Amino acid sequence: MKNLVYIIIGVIVLLIGVRWFMQQSAAKEAFDKHEALIKETNECLEMAEWNCAEKNVRALLKESPDDQNLQLHLAGILYEQERYEDCIAYVQSRKFNHADLDYLKQKSEALIREMDELKIERSMHFRVEFEGRPARKDIMEALAVLEVAYDSLCHLFDFHPENKMHLVLYESSQYQGVGPRPEWVGAVFDGKLRIPVNVMAYREIYRPMFFHELTHAFIRAMTRYHVPLWVNEGIAQVIDASRTGMQRPEGGAPSIGALTTPFVNENNTGAAVKLYWYSQAMVERLLARNASLVHFRDFIQNMRTLGDEPALQKFYGVTTQQLLDEVR
């Protein structure tokens, strides 16, 4: 009888142990599945694969519906997919306030207005939106120059952007993009290349301008924004070559802080010229160490995971401060 009791107790303990093991295994499986989903989502975001990113973020939101970071990501994904009405509706349905949500809503509303009001021409890799009645030859010339610049940059960086790119040729300030800017700013890239239509009368101006702004578009596609301002502006100037050979501006060098703050925040034209000159000179010093733009592409793409300074050290053996000191 006593042996039977021991056997029963043993069976119960065994069953409890098996159940505990199965629960632990299920919990580990669920955890591993969750971690794999997060990893895949980050990879989709890094590669700008928006359909994959949306599917995964929505799956993660089912697990954590109140996660504000995930909600911000989903709003941004809808915007990147050019689903502007969906983006606005999603932002308006959120139960919290955030500056990024306000920006996405404002930008989406502006872009919806643009699509309703502006005329459109297309080429293989570009969509040109324009207002007024610019000469058709100017529009076709813009597309031709952009296609040449696109092919050149694809070759230089050994990189092909996934999505079609947009150019806005504007007359009135309402189409120059969201937010104020100083008078010295002639063109801008804010997800679209925005160029005043009147520059199309001056080939020597608009050709380097197109190359400059399109370089920003490529850098964005390669890095998803994670690149210091001096690197972004410096390489764009190296590519457009419009300032190559300019003498060093008078006065002291800008600080690293100034070189990593958006240049459009600088209202003084002289100070802005200095920021651009030093940015180009610093990137030229990088290319003097290794002239390959494929190497440069690998460098900027590794900044997100390595960090800015470690990436500089790994790919060029130098720090930002050392570069700045070299060009003073």
Image (cartoon, rainbow, N blue to C red):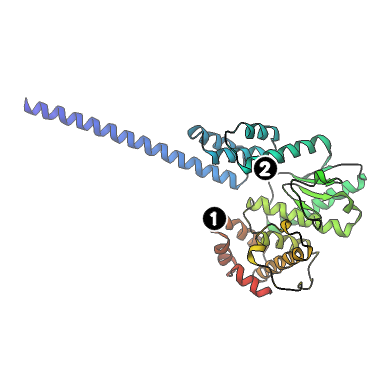
Q: Can residue 182 be seen by looking at this rendering? A: yes
Where does label 1 land, which residue? 305
The amino acid sitting under disc 1 is: Thr
Q: Can residue 52 be seen by looking at this rendering? A: no
Pointer 1: residues within 10 angstroms few (<14), some, or many (20+)?
few
Does the residue at mark 1 contact the one at mark 2 (Cβ under 8 Å)?
no
Residue beneath the point at 78% across and 66% down: 270
Question: In the picture provided, is 66 more to the left or to the right than 323?
Answer: left
Q: Secondary structure at mark 1?
A: helix
User: The N terminus lies in which quarter of the figure?
Assistant: top left
For the residues labelled 1 and 2, the Cα–Cα distance comes to 26 Å
Residue beneath the point at 71% across and 38% down: 108
User: The C terminus lies in which quarter of the figure?
Assistant: bottom right
Q: Position of residue 297 (x, y in %)?
A: 64, 58
The numbered dot on residue 47 is: none
Q: Position of residue 70 (x, y in %)?
A: 55, 39
Picture layout, residue 317 above or below residue 34: below
Tell me where residue 229 sits by quadrant: bottom right
Given residues 166 and 179, the one toward you in this image is: 179
Q: Position of residue 62 (x, y in %)?
A: 51, 32
Q: Position of residue 290 (x, y in %)?
A: 65, 68
Residue beneath the point at 20% across and 32% down: 13
In the orientation shown, which residue stands out farthest toward the top? 1
Which mark is first along the chain, 2 or 1? 2
Pointer 2: residues within 10 angstroms few (<14), some, or many (20+)?
few
Tell me where residue 68 sits by quadrant: top right
The amino acid sitting under disc 2 is: Tyr
Q: Secondary structure at mark 2?
A: helix
Where does label 2 land, which residue? 103
